[in-house]
Structures are given as C-alpha cells and as structure tokens.
C-alpha cells in the first residue's frame, strides 16, 4: 500500500505544483534555519571528553588575601603557584596537572632561519594522559623530567609540519626563547572543542604548538614568557610568577579513578585550606570548588548567549513555517475533496485516506529536508565567514545530517496530521451530490 500511496502523492504533486513547491519551501526554510543554529550550538556545547568528564575536576581555592569575605562568594578561578605545586606534590588524585600558557619564539636549533612565535603550554607530565592527547610520534615526558627541570618538549602536528616538514622529529632539537629543547613527542592532530583545560587563553582556539615542563619554563635560566589572566592582591615589586608571589595565575586539574571519589577529594581540599589557614597563609573561611568538566563549562557560560537566543528564534521560525505548511496542505486537501469523496464511495476506509495524506506530507518533508540541507550548508558557510573564534568550527557532521532529514520528515508529518484528519472526515455523499 505504501507504494500505491507514494504514487498518488507524486500525481498530486504534479497536479498542484505551486502549493507543493510552497509547502516544500516552507519546510526547507524552517529546517535550514534550525539546522544551522543547532549545528553551531552542538559544536559549542558538546562534552569535549565525554568518557571521563565526570572524573576530571577543575580545582579552585580561595586566595590567601585579606579581602572581606561574603558567604557564597566564588573563590579565585586560578591558583597561586605555591598552592598548585603543593597539591601536585601531595598527588591525591590518580593524575594531576598544573599549567599555564605562554607565547614563545621557536626555531630548529640547527637552522639559520627567523623564529616562529607560537602559543606554548607549561604543564606537568600527567597532562597528556589526563586529557587523552594523541601522539603521532614519541610520547610525553616523565614525572622525573618535571623534577629535574629537563629541557624536553612536545610539539604539535602543525609545528612539526612547519619546522620539520612533517618528519618524525623525536630526538631532534629546537630552540624556544634562548633555550634548546629535545623533542620527546609530536602530537597527532588534536583540537578539543571547547578548549576546556584552559579557558583563559581562548575558549575555542587551537591547541598550543609547544608543550614544556612547567618547572623548566619557570627556571631562572629559561624564563619563558607567560600569557593569560593574572590576579594579584598585594603590591609586590618582585616577579608575579615567583613561588610565593601573592598572585593567582595557574590552572590545576585532577583526574580521579572514579566519580565517587569526588566528595573525598573536596574534603581533602577543605583540609588543605584549613592547614594553610593554620599556617597563616589563608585568613578567610574554607572556600573551595572542584567542578567536573561539564560543570566548569556551564559555570563559565562557554556557549555565547547570542547562540542560545538564535536557537530559540530558529525554532520559533520553524513553528511559523509549520503553521504555513498546515495551511498549504489543507488547501490541497480541500481542492481534492471530490476525488476523496469518490474514493470513499468506492469503499476506501477513512484510515486509508488518512495514511495517504500522511505519506504525501512525508514526501514533502523529504523534499523539504533536501532543500533545507542546502540552506543549512549555506548558512554554516556564512557562519564560517564571521570573525567569531568559534566560526571555523561550524561544520555539518553525519549526526546532524541525519538529524536534518529526521527533523524535516517529523515536521511535515506533524503539519500533515490536521489536513489528513480533515481529508478522512470528508462526507462522500455531499461530494457525489455536488458532482
């Protein structure tokens, strides 16, 4: 019967070309707008590391300052170097990493060429395993390299292409600043979206090109420049990056073996805060946070408010398009009332009429989905031309492609319910009498 109904739908389309085209256009416009905004929203709001996001915690401690405390007040979003290094030494998680960003001139140690300035990441050895960083060659450095302040580095796929033509550069050297580093590993292409591990240096930017041990970067003989937010609460003529400087500028993540350990880890942070207060460093009540990846992204409101608004507006527009589609399908139904009356008089049951018109609506939805897909691709191309940091990430993946057609067919079926119900209620006697 489905093939028969599909054949009737094609005949109906040929007889009512204008109404059919308008219905397809209405569906296409609504679907195109929805898929464009939904794709952007999905890119920005996705879980960047779903298999362990509930085991990765971003740590916050209240800064040891003298400011007046208000209950419920958020602690500093970053840690002092002293606290980060203390937590790293105590190592209460399965893995832990402290980190900060920088902007570094690099060049091959054996090449007489101008330096290339790249974004750097100063971190500890667990960073790569904690965040499932993929390697094309080699591996990250060991914890012993952190302690020894070893001159080792990991470089990105892109920097390896630039400096070494994409060859396996493990064991070779490059110069960062005034220091020569041995390359321990080369990353495979990697770009978590958003760049959750450090939201202070760009929420949707590319990953850094150079990774070196934090202790090495801070060594007096190396002194690589840092970048990102720094919050100091006491005047000091010294280096804000010094171990005891009254400045928060270091991000700290911990990975737990199980989500169930989160409460124990928060209790450990409270105990640490109490110990620092007893030592005279912290003077305010305990105020700690340890948020999971998704909680941290929600707290930081990573998805721009205008993107959320665009999603709601797109769905409102789709609703308007559906209302118009309902009207167009009703018009088609009423124009075919004599035909429906004859079929009913010849014995066609109401459910057959209802099914026939739903099949027609589904066919319109399929055509609208194809046209909507083209409009969505055009809309995403327009998004990628915008100056926003996330614009280049707006691409339609297979999941959203399937969603486009599912939305289109579902929308057309919803729009076709009322016309189909109206068609099956047509009285055959009145239509035959009118003939």
Image (cartoon, helix red, strand yellow):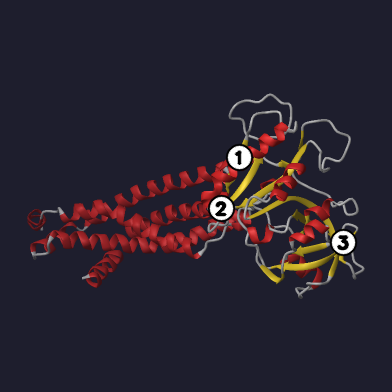
Which residue position is annotated with label 3?
115
- Assign a secondary structure to mark 1: strand
Residue at 74% in and 26% down: 66
Q: Nearer the viewer, mark 3 or mark 1?
A: 1
Q: Secondary structure at mark 2?
A: loop
Give the residue at mark 1.
Answer: 289
Q: Are the residues tagged 1 and 2 within 8 Å (C-beta)?
A: no
Q: Give the foreground label among 3 and 2.
A: 2
Q: Residue at x 72, y 64 (%)?
A: 140
Rendering coords of residue 76 (x, y %): 68, 37
Q: How many marks?
A: 3
Q: Residue furthest bottom?
A: 167
Mark earlier in primary sequence (3, 2)? 2
> In percent of the image, x 65 and y 66: which residue is there?
134
Q: Quadrant of residue 362?
A: bottom left
The residue that label 2 is drawn on is 55
Horizontal arrangement in the rendering, residue 386 relative to residue 371 (left or right): right
| Residue with the most extreme top position | 68
Crowd rating for badge 1 (residues with CA inside 10 Å; few <14, some 14–19, many 20+): some
> What percent of the width, then of the height, locates residue 31?
43, 55
Is residue 295 in view from this perspective?
no
Q: Quadrant of the N terminus?
A: bottom left
Q: Mark 1 or mark 2: which comes first in sequence?
A: 2
SS for dot 3? loop
Dot 3: few (<14), some (14–19), or many (≥20) neighbours within 10 Å? some
Q: CA distance from mark 3 to mark 2?
A: 39 Å
The tag earlier along the polypeptide, 3 or 1, is 3
Which mark, by number, is residue 73?
Answer: none
């Amino acid at each position: 019967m489905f093939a028969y109904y599909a054949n009737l739908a094609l005949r109906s389309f040929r007889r009512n070309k204008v109404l059919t085209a308008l219905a397809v256009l209405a569906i296409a416009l609504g679907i195109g707008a929805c898929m464009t905004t939904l794709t952007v929203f999905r890119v920005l709001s996705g879980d960047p590391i779903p298999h362990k996001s509930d085991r990765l915690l971003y740590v916050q401690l209240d800064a040891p300052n003298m400011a007046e405390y208000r209950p419920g007040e958020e602690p500093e979003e970053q840690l002092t170097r002293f606290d980060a290094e203390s937590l790293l030494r105590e190592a209460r998680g399965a893995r832990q990493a402290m980190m900060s960003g920088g902007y570094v001139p690099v060049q091959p140690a054996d090449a007489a060429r101008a330096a290339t300035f790249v974004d750097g990441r100063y971190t500890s050895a667990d960073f790569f395993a904690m965040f499932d960083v993929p390697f094309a060659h080699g591996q990250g450095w060991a914890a012993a390299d952190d302690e020894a302040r070893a001159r080792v580095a990991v470089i990105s796929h892109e920097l390896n292409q630039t400096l070494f033509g994409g060859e396996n550069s493990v064991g070779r050297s490059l110069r960062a600043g005034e220091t020569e580093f041995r390359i321990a590993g080369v990353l495979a292409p990697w770009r978590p979206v958003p760049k959750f591990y450090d939201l202070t240096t760009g929420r949707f930017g590319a990953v850094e090109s150079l990774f070196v041990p934090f202790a090495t970067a801070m060594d007096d003989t190396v002194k690589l420049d840092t970048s990102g937010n720094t919050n100091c609460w006491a005047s000091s003529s010294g280096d804000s990056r010094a171990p005891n400087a009254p400045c928060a500028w270091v991000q700290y993540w911990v990975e737990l073996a199980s989500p169930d350990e989160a409460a124990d880890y928060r209790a450990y942070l409270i105990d640490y805060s109490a110990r620092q207060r007893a030592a005279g460093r912290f003077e305010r009540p305990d105020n700690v946070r340890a948020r999971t990846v998704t909680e941290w992204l929600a707290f930081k409101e990573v998805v721009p408010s205008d993107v959320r608004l665009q999603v709601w507006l797109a769905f409102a527009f789709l609703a308007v398009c559906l209302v118009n589609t309902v009207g167009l399908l009703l018009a088609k139904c009423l124009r075919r009332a004599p035909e429906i009356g004859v079929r009913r008089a010849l014995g066609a049951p109401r459910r057959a009429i209802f099914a026939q018109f739903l099949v027609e609506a589904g066919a319109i939805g399929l055509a609208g989905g194809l046209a909507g897909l083209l409009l969505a691709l055009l809309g995403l191309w327009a998004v990628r031309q915008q100056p926003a940091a996330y614009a280049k990430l707006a691409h339609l993946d297979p999941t959203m492609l399937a969603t486009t057609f599912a939305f289109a067919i579902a929308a057309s079926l919803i729009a076709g319910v009322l016309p189909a119900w109206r068609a099956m209620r047509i009285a055959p006697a009145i239509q035959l009498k009118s003939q």
